[in-house]
Every structure is written in C-alpha cells, then in structure tokens.
Image (tube, rainbow, N blue to C red):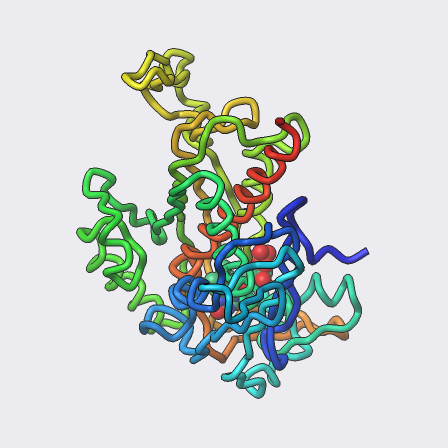
Amino acid sequence: MSFNTFGHLFRVTTFGESHGPAIGCVVDGCPPGIPLTESDIQPWLDRRKPGQSKFVSQRKEEDRVRILSGVFQDERMPEQLTTGTPIALLIDNTDVRSKDYADIRDKFRPGHADYTYWAKYGVRDYRGGGRQSARETATRVAAGAIARKILDRIYGAVTIRAALIQMGPHRIDRNRWDWNKVQQNPFNSPDPGVVNQWADYLEGLRKAGSSCGAIIEVVAEGVPAGLGAPVYGKLDADLAAALMGINAVKGVEIGAGMKAAELTGEENADEMRRGGDGKPLFLSNQAGGILGGISTGQPIVARFSVKPTSSILTPRRTIDVAGNETEIFTKGRHDPCVGIRAVPIGEAMVACVLADHALRHRAQIV
Ligand SMILES: Cc1cc2nc3c(=O)[nH]c(=O)nc-3n(C[C@H](O)[C@H](O)[C@H](O)COP(=O)(O)O)c2cc1C
C-alpha cells in the first residue's frame, strides 16, 4: 500500500520527483461551482519557489502551474468554474542539474532520507533526492490554493498566514509583530527588527557551507467553532499530522504547546465572557483555538520546527550502499535554512486540513 494521498473529503494525491519531467497533484472532492483559474494558484507557488534570494536554493524553477482537468467554461459562463470532478495540476521541472548528485549516488547523506528510502525500497532516485525532495511540496501549495477557495466559499473570509519566528537560536521580538512585513523581507519575518541579524547569521552559515533550523508559526483566522471530528479525527491531531508531514519538520505544537506544561491551571485555561455580539469572548488563547479536537472560533495557532538542512558542504562521515565507511560532502543547490520556504507550505497544509474538516462538518451536521 502506498501513501501519497491525504485528506478525507478534500483529498490530495501528489506525484513526481525532484529531477523527473514534472511534479503534480490530483485534488479530488472540490465542490462544483467554485471559480478557479491558474491565476488563483500561481501567487501562492511564487511565494514558495526557489531562487528568490541568496538565502534560499539557487535552483531556478518558474513553477508554472497548469490545470489539466476539473474545470469548465463556455461562452455562456462569465468565469471558469470547478465541475466537482478531479482537478489535476501539473508543474514542469525545468532546471534540473542531476550531475551534481553523481558523486553521492551510492552514499547516504547523514540526516537525509537517502538511507531509509534505500533500506525500504531497495531502489532510489538519488537525483535531487527524488521523491524525498521538498520539491514535492510545491504541489501541496497548489492544492492549498484550492482549499482556501473552498473555505472562503463556505465561511466568507478565512485568513491563513504564517511567518518565520525563529532562525537558529535567534528569535523575533513578538512585540514588533507586523503581518504586513512578512512578505517584505527575504525571510518571511513578521519582525523587521530581526532581519539584519538573521541576514548576517545565515550569510555566515551559507558561506561556511553549513545550515540551520527554524520555527514557523501559522495562524488561521475566521474559522468558526465546530470544525474537528472527535475522537480520531480531532482537528489538532490532523493539523499536527499535516505539518509533521512536511519535509524536515521535527516538532509541532498548538497554542501554548510544550510551554503549557509550565503553566498553572489558572494561567492555561482560557476564561470566557459574553461578547458584545452575544457570542463567547475568550480572554486568552492558550488553547490555540482548539478544545477537545474541535475549533473554538478563536484563531487557530500552530507552530512547527524544521531541522537544519542536512545537505551541507562540510565533510561528514557516512557509509555507502555496499556498507563501506566513507566521507561525504554535498554539492548542488540547497536551502541553508529550509524554514524560509516552509512558510507558504505550512499555510497550505493548514488550508487543506481546514477545507477537509469544513466539508466533513457539513457532511455530518445537518
Ligand atoms: C522548503 C524546503 C526545502 C528544503 N530544501 C532542502 C535542501 O535544499 N537540501 C536538503 O538536504 N534538504 C532540504 N529540505 C529537507 C529535506 O527534504 C528533508 O530533510 C528530507 O526529505 C528528509 O526528511 P525529514 O527531514 O523529514 O526526515 C527542504 C525542506 C523544505 C521544507
């Protein structure tokens, strides 16, 4: 059994390898009648694509998306609409340099998935990491764009935004948080005050051929109370699985997360009052917008950490496919901090999970 599909009613199946002809996905379960063109998807892909600054992989991919199926328009229709049938999306790989991987095709990069793919399948596309490459995540971002349209159709405006909040040991100052600044610096930082420090830090690592980890925070606003399917389809559990499924992710938390262990019951429980509109008003959001696996109507707050990129220029000890001890250093074009480009991927995964839960909620609650 192969597992390249996620979601229940909003189902995404992805395919393709880093250095194959193309990558893509099939989105099944999108309701009919939703306006959808390539221009709805492309801006999200543009935020993820490599080569946009010296702080990310220098691979130059246009990441142009094509919609192959699942939409229709004729002369009587003012706009192209989804038909309710599977939506296939294709993105060509145009800038592959497979020779960069010739030296390491029989060696396992420490910290990467080379060994485990080989141990499991016995055959491995080593060019750019094949399917273990985060190139695959472009297709998730494309699917996320469709998920956002479903959420907007059902609930009006749902805003799903993410930002880089820590690079290596250097954290943002949350008092300076400004969402408008996230797309105005090469790091997706919401705190402009930290940008120079991050630039110096990452430039030093990059020149040394090294790498660092990061933490990303995702916030979804406008999600009503009630999404989530206890007890084995809890919203927080599904979000955690989706975020943990992103390459290089090693930790996920919701709301106060790991820090909740340090709080008292008084500090942690979000007290409630009656709001001016008659709806509940929570006085804090330690729960990250989810209680009992069901959304509270508060902003949903999730955080995930990514490990330092394992493809580095420093020589490392490893073994080869024959079991011989050897050394490796990785050439090629790599992200010195994968957290930067993980920001739109985190948003997309949250969008897909929320769209899936929105459809599941409507299917159950009549
Ligand atoms: C946006 C993004 C870009 C990445 N770029 C690289 C890269 O250039 N080089 C690399 O070795 N790993 C990169 N990774 C991480 C690997 O894909 C990942 O570590 C590998 O597939 C092993 O999986 P795991 O770390 O989840 O165990 C990237 C991850 C993300 C999310």
Quadrant containing the C terminus is: top right
Residue closer to the observer: 32 or 17: 32
Say if residue 250 shows up in the picture: yes
Residue drawn where x is 24% and y is 63% of the image:
200
Q: Residue furthest right?
A: 1
Image quadrant in which you'd find residue 228: top right
Q: Quadrant of the N terminus?
A: bottom right
Residue occupying image coordinates x 35% and y 70%: 206
Image coords of residue 256 (percent x, y): 41, 29
For residue 17, which quarter of the picture? bottom right
User: Outermost residue, bottom direction?
Assistant: 99
Left or right, 366 with respect to 184, comes to right
Across and down, in percent, residue 285 comes to 37, 25
Name the residue located 45 percent from the left edge and 30 percent from the top edge.
224
User: Which of the pair 256/337 is nearer the observer?
Assistant: 256
> Which residue is pictured at 42% across the width and 31% down the height?
255
Residue 111 occupies quadrant? bottom right
Q: Is residue 85 above or below residue 129?
A: above
Residue 122 drawn at (x, y percent): 79, 69
Image x and y of residue 84, in percent: 63, 55
Q: Please name whichever residue, 281 or 344, is drawn nearer the observer in this view of the structure.
A: 281
Q: Nearer the viewer, residue 77 or 291?
A: 77
